[in-house]
Image: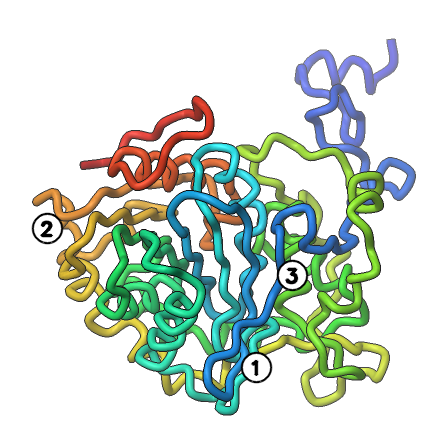
């Protein structure tokens, strides 16, 4: 018996670099590495229609699915687009009978307005109310927003006469206000440009911004634009067909499993904003660092405004530590339902879309807003 074998038996540990099962970390050599598929996919497998809604001199882009039931309106967070709701929409449509409309907010996605810089909470709320009024004939509306979109949903709620329910995902006034001090540092740490859409998808996944690669492949193209055409990156993949999506995409993993990269050593360093190579033709659709003047207004007074909305409400959080004092009191008084979804990042509805869909679907059925479309797992709120 060799000395190496003796040492292995003595320590009862496998030698470094040996793979003893599917769940083990593979060798770091290139021969053992599995290349993950980061190729972007289009919106078609997730939504029925992609259309523009004219409001005065502005054009708001929306993605829709479904033909009956209440209207579930989805608002994305700052820097994202309506496509952040793709996997969530795919899930919830199997659970309840409803119509879905995901909106590209002002300054984001494929929405184009005469004043792209006016991202105040009041303006964004008025935009949302105007779009809803333009597409619905007084159908019941359930409004759900994530992060900045959650703040906009709360501000828009009083403007929507046919609102019957409100959902807010991972945004709490106290936590949000505390985070503003470090926001600029975070934005500076991001790459300013990418050479391809797949490189942008890879960065978002490997950096942990989005932990579900299937969701990132459809949502990231809605966050970047082509500097040569000045169009959203989604237009560069419009030639893809649904059949090619189905044949080329890697097998879908169980969505309750967070997909995270094990290795980060191959991640390229963020390129210098001042000297981005000409080959890096994709940049962020919106420069969030220039929206700082609106950050305070998005979140100040949010907890009180949320509690004062006179319809059934649900708050979904990535961690219970995010709950501030005012909402803690309101939750104990039963003023809203709350659900904590662990093992996910800030973009909760992308990281664990099935779990978020179950929570929203349970809320809609419990409040009798919608009829169940299947016997989906029901979640139990904290109050």
Look at discs 3 and 1 and give the one toward the viewer.
1
Residue 380's place in the image compared with 149, above or below, is above
**Structural crowding at the residue carrying mark 2, measured as other residues with C-alpha within 10 Å and reported as few (<14), some (14–19) or many (≥20):** few
Indicate which label's residue lies in the foreground, 2 or 1: 1
What residue would you read off at disc 3?
Answer: 220
Q: Quadrant of the N terminus?
A: top right
> To which residue does mark 1 refer?
112
Q: Residue 198: which disc?
A: none
Question: On the rendered structure, is 185 left or right of 324?
Answer: right
Of mark 2 and mark 1, the one earlier in the sequence is 1
Query: Residue at image x 81%, y 51%?
Result: 241
Secondary structure at badge 1 equals: loop
Residue at the far front: name it: 137
CA gap between label 2 and label 1 equals 40 Å
Of 132 and 39, the residue lying toward us: 132
Which quarter of the rendering shows the C terminus?
A: top left
**Residue wearing tag 2:** 329
Q: Secondary structure at mark 2?
A: helix
Location of residue 59 by image quarter: bottom right
Q: Position of residue 124 (x, y in %)?
A: 38, 76
What count of labels does the image hold?
3
In the displayed structure, does residue 139 sit left or right of residue 219?
A: left
Identify the element where label 3 is drawn.
Answer: helix
Q: x, y (%) of residue 37?
A: 79, 47
């Amino acid at each position: 018996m060799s000395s190496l074998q003796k040492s292995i038996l003595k320590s009862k540990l496998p030698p470094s670099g040996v793979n003893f099962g599917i769940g083990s970390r593979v060798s770091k050599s290139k021969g053992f590495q599995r290349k993950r598929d980061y190729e972007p996919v289009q919106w078609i497998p997730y939504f029925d229609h992609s259309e523009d809604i004219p409001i005065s001199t502005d054009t708001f882009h929306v993605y829709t699915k479904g033909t009956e039931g209440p209207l579930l309106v989805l608002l994305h967070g700052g820097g994202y687009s309506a496509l952040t709701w793709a996997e969530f929409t795919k899930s919830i449509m199997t659970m309840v009978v409803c119509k879905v409309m995901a909106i590209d907010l002002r300054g984001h996605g494929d929405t184009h307005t005469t004043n792209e810089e006016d991202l105040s909470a009041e303006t964004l709320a008025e935009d949302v109310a105007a779009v809803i009024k333009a597409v619905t004939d007084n159908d019941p509306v359930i409004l759900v927003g994530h992060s900045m979109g959650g703040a906009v949903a709360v501000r828009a709620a009083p403007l929507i006469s046919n609102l019957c329910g409100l959902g807010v995902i991972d945004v709490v006034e106290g936590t949000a206000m505390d985070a503003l001090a470090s926001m600029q540092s975070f934005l500076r740490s991001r790459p300013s440009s990418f050479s391809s859409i797949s490189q942008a998808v890879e960065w978002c996944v490997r950096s942990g911004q989005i932990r579900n690669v299937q969701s990132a492949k459809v949502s990231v193209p809605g966050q970047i634009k082509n500097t040569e055409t000045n169009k959203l990156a989604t237009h560069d993949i419009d030639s893809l067909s649904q059949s090619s999506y189905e044949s080329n995409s890697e097998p879908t993993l169980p969505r309750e499993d967070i997909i995270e990269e094990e290795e980060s050593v191959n991640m390229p360093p963020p390129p210098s904003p001042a000297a981005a190579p000409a080959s890096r033709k994709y940049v962020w659709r919106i420069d969030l660092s220039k929206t700082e003047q609106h950050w305070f207004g998005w979140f100040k007074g949010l907890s009180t405004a949320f509690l004062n909305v006179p319809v059934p409400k649900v708050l979904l959080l990535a961690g219970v530590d995010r709950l501030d004092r005012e909402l803690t009191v309101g939750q104990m008084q039963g003023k809203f339902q709350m659900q904590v979804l662990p093992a996910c990042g800030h973009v909760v509805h992308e990281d664990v879309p099935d779990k978020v869909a179950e929570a929203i679907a349970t809320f809609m059925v419990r409040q009798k807003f919608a009829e169940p479309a299947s016997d989906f797992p029901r979640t139990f709120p904290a109050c």
